[in-house]
Image: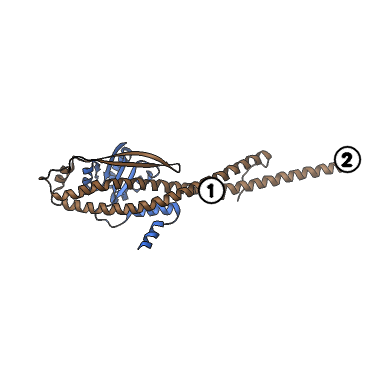
């Protein structure tokens, strides 16, 4: 490992030693943070995977039944039926800190209105099922949104933390140690030289 | 930013989301889709996007990955069999921890 390009002086030695202490402490803290993030991420990602599978299955069923129901009417008529929503999703969007990482929190409630957005005589009954099922699945979709986003942010943070840990462990700390060793040896050498010089001068005087 | 949900996808499917009060968008053509998503990213906090639309805007979705909002969720097409969103989860996991844990457990279950 290449040492740093610094002058071998006592002041530099002191500075580098304090930098080494900070680097080692930072490395330990980052490694702990990385481990904690991985622990949280692993449990969340399993939840994310199973929830997504479940939601996708449900949505596919809803979409197919809606397409089937829609085939009895023209696109414009369908648009007309759904133009004025009777149910409304209301949700609180906040953020919370997870291992010092800001992640979203979504809490959902469905404000119920009239049963269906369309008239009974004007449409067909096949629309009821997908509409009702979508209302039921929407809170799950929003929960999935929260978990998936948390997972994405955590994975990004883990990547970054790992890179920093590796940079400290394999580049910065060895470089500092090597430089400290070099400066110590240089100073020792200077001390020995001056001591011998003094001894020689003393012997010459005597 | 509005506290409403935007849904971006095929017209024949997204109209259903109007029943729960979401705002729906179904532009046609790659450029229009990208422009619409760009606008939605600035104006909405939750965006649902269909798989075929998400494939056209991967870079835009990737840009929002770091921030808490907007949250972009990929929803499936009605008759699609590929696991686009699940594959994304796996890719993220492999990048973060270097292994595909869920897949291994999934295989063990079978």
Callout 1: 10 Å neighbours few (<14), some, many (20+)? few
Residue at far left of view:
A121
- Residue B79 relative to residue A144: left or right: left
Disc sitting over residue A167 in the figure: 1
Q: Nearer the viewer, residue B30 or A102?
A: A102
Q: Nearer the viewer, residue A135 or B43?
A: A135
Give the spatial CA distance, label 1 vs label 2.
56 Å
Q: Report the chain holding disc 1.
A: A
Disc sitting over residue A25 in the figure: none
Residue at far top of view:
B1
Question: A87 above or below B51?
Answer: above
The colour assigned to chain B within the rendered structure: blue
Q: Which residue is mark 2?
A: A205
In the rendered image, what is the letter of the chain coloured brown? A
Q: Residue at x 61, y 41 (%)?
A: A18
Q: Residue at x 28, y 57 (%)?
A: B81
Q: Residue at x 51, y 46 (%)?
A: A30
């Amino acid at each position: 490992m290449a040492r740093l390009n610094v002058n071998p002086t006592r002041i530099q030695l002191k500075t580098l030693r304090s930098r080494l202490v900070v680097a080692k402490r930072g490395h330990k803290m980052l490694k702990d943070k990385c481990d904690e993030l991985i622990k949280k991420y692993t449990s969340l990602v399993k939840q994310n995977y199973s929830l997504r599978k479940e939601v996708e299955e449900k949505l596919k069923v809803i979409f197919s039944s809606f397409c089937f129901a829609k085939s009895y009417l023209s696109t414009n008529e369908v648009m007309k039926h759904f133009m004025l929503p009777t149910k409304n999703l209301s949700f609180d969007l906040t953020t919370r800190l997870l291992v010092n990482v800001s992640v979203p929190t979504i809490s959902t409630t469905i404000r119920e209105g009239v049963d269906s957005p369309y008239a009974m005589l004007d449409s067909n009954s096949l629309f009821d099922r997908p509409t009702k099922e979508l209302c039921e699945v929407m809170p799950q979709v929003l929960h999935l949104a929260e978990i998936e986003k948390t997972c994405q942010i955590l994975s990004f943070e883990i990547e970054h933390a790992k890179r920093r840990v590796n940079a400290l462990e394999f580049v910065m700390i060895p470089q500092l140690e090597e430089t400290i060793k070099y400066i110590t040896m240089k100073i020792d050498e200077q001390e020995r030289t001056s001591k011998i010089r003094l001894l020689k001068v003393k012997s010459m005087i005597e | 930013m509005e506290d409403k949900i935007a849904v971006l996808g095929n017209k024949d499917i997204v109209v259903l989301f109007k029943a729960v009060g979401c705002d729906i968008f179904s532009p046609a053509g790659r450029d229009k889709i990208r422009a619409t998503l760009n606008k939605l990213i600035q104006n909405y906090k939750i965006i649902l996007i269909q798989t075929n639309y998400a494939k056209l805007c991967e870079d835009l979705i990737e840009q929002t990955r770091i921030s808490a909002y907007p949250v972009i969720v990929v929803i499936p097409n009605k008759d699609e069999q590929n696991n686009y969103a699940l594959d994304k989860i796996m890719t993220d996991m492999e990048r973060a921890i270097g292994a595909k844990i869920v897949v291994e457990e999934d295989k063990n279950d079978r």
